Amino acid sequence: MRKPKRPVMRALLAATTALGLCAPFAAAQAKTVVTLWSWSPVQSTTEAMVKAIEKAHPDIVVRATIQPHTAYFTALKAAAASGTLPDIIGLPPGAYTQEYRPHLMDLAGVATTLWGKDWAKNFAPALLTQARLGNPKGDSGFYVLPQEAEVLNIWYNRDAFAKAKIASPPKTMDELVADAKKLKAAGYIPFYQGGGTGLFDAWVFSQIAAQTDLKGLGQAQEGMPVWTQPGMVAAATAWERLFKEGVVQPGALSALQYPTGANLFAAGRVGMISLGSWWLQETALSSNPALKTMSGYGKFFFPAVTPNGKASPPLGGIDLGWGITKSAASSPAETKATETVLKELISGVGEQVALNQLNDLPAFAGMKPTEKLNPHLQNLYDTYIQELQVAHPHAIGNPVIFEALVANLQAIAAGQKTPAAAMAAVQAVAQKQAH
Amino acid sequence: MSLVAGGTMSPPARRSRPTRLRIGASQIEAWAYVLPALGLFLLFELYPILANLWASVSHPHAAPSLARYAEAASDPVFWVAVRNSVVWVVVSIALEIAIGFPLAVLIELAIPRGRAWFRTLLFLPMVVTPSVIALVFTTIYAPDYGLLYGLFQALGLANSFPAVLGEPAFATYAVIVVNVWQWCGFFVLMYCVGIAQLDAEILDAAAIDGAVGLARVRYVIWPMLRSTHVSLVVLGTIQALQQFPLIYLMTQGGPANASQTLATYIFQTGFDENRMGFASTVAVVLFVLALVLVAVEYAIADNWLARLPLARTRGRAA
């Protein structure tokens, strides 16, 4: 009697196991999968954002892949060439967005569907201008829409300043040089510059150029050959002073802003460093009280390079934008799911999660952190929001000009070229690109 | 069948028939073995090379031309990259042989016990991923908080510490040192294998003739390792020309393009500047440079190494 039962039991067990294994797949199949790639926000923040979006939309599964900057753009290039791009991709404005423009949908129509016909009022004009940076003449499409924005500035360690007996952040270049000496004497790296990270070389230069030739900087960002204008050469000369007069640390050209510079600054070894509004994310990532509350840190704009001049005006723009690929949706359900995820990333639960971690500034009007911030942190956040409204663009649109600028700024710093000769070299590249 | 039909089968005929059939069958069998590999070679080696060549001369809205080669020839960074690539080959191989060969001789001839332990120890850097090595050495070289800086500080020379990765004149050599550190173990291992395979009778005979100590190394062992030298020089050339991760992670080709090589310049122009056509041109130049350097090395090996004392003796004996 017992023997005949065994095959039946085995069959039942196998069937149950098979059904059990199939169940998750069947459940997943009932949901719409949206794939998303980016280099930002950081992995933990992205995971929290995805969780929030999936909770709000149980019929959607978001498969997010976050990779380091270089690896991400290498993977993206390969995916574009092989026709395997994900549904949604994260992009900075300018050259990167332009590179993938042929693969991206114009989001103006999607934005009207998601936020109504006055959707553009929800974004600062500068952000929308930057979203279209580098579009061909006559193409007014939006191939990315911003989730997060940023403002560039110099951060300083308040404790280091106190120990070096510096009462307040420098207001002029001469004060900056003097403060650097005091910080060095007190045992700190005075002004950390990750000169090996070209982006931050270009950003420091741009902050200086914004006070010596704001109009020229804007034209240069658009690709115009204006690099030999007096204001641009003056900015290059101020850049040279940072290295010649010992403001930045020795060997700065081999140093990286991330992770080395940021880590040293977080560890309290650095007096000043050029970062931006995204530094506030340390409040969520760090367990150090000085960082968690930002009580140990303050910010200022690059000091006036001339004795009677003014500090740099705020520079900033899109930190992260999202684009929808043309291959994203093959059915109305997929289209709806992709658009829903985009909305949640920019103005919904996804952005709210990122914002509560102070990942960066919201691009969408009306978004605010729902977590209570301490007065110092609230003040930092509020001033950033105000500065973003008047910020001038910070991105150089043409990648060839960008690389030429970085190489020539490094040549100035290394003493290989004079500021005038370096700017002439960038000018030559820009002229060639203009043709 | 025809032979059988012929009635008598002479022994040669009986031998020739199966031989002919065997050749035919073995040819088919041989092709069957070769074809998959050949297919993969055509698909993943030859096709990309040809496609790259085409990408270097083709233009989106114009006829194919050599315009990008002319652009490269007038690009100063390209020539810095060419020079550095050659420097990488020459300095890396020279140092790897200069360090690797004596170490191998010491291990094989002067250390009676624990050779395997030494070989393993020296080979260990080879199995460490370049990203880890780059991170470690960047920290060692770092001014202000690096290990070397600490050493200089302890000696009271902190103000004389050179920020090697940040100095255009030193950056390339600083990364080459790291490459040599990583690859020296491979050279040691190859030389150890070569020395272990030397004919003991020749070494004994040489010893009887008075070739002992350094003379034995110089006049017997060094020339007898000719094929090892050639293999290592060719492999070292290819490795040095292909080196990318250490340079990219330690200097990103900077400062001011000072440590740019053809390999890093391909990446920069292709992926950072989005100039794939130009990057393909640089890739073709790198390919040609590798062919030329290897051809030169073989020519030197044939002419110069053949004139070494023992090789001459062996040549005459032959």
Image: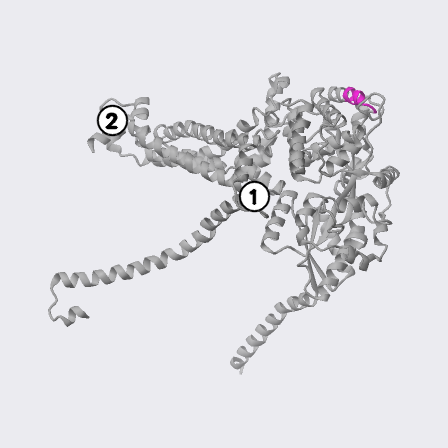
Can residue B74 be seen by looking at this rendering?
yes
Mark 2, residue position: B206
Which stretch did the figure color magenta? A171-179
Select label 2 or label 1 by which is in front: 1
Q: How far is mark 2 from mark 1, CA to CA? A: 58 Å
Tell me: B289 left or right of A342: left
Q: What residue occupies the far front of the structure in this picture?
A: B63
**Mark 2 belongs to chain:** B
Furthest residue toward bottom: A1
Using a 10 Å C-alpha cutoff, classify the residue at mark 2 as few (fewer than 14 neighbours), some (14 to 19) or many (20 or more). some
Say whether disc 2 or disc 1 marks the residue closer to the N-terminus: 2
Marks 2 and 1 share the same chain: yes
Quadrant of res A270 = top right
Task: Reply above or below: A359 against B103.
Answer: below
Q: Dot 1: within a 10 Å radius of its alpha carbon, few (fewer than 14), some, or many (20 or more) residues?
A: many
SS label for mark 2: helix
Q: Please tell me which residue lies in front, B138 or B40.
A: B40
Q: Is residue A176 magenta?
A: yes
Left-right relation of A137 to B159? right
Q: Amino acid at mark 2?
A: Ala
Task: Please state the chain letter of the residue tagged with numbered disc 1 in the rendered image.
Answer: B
What's the amino acid at mark 1?
Answer: Gly
Give the residue pinned by disc 1.
B277
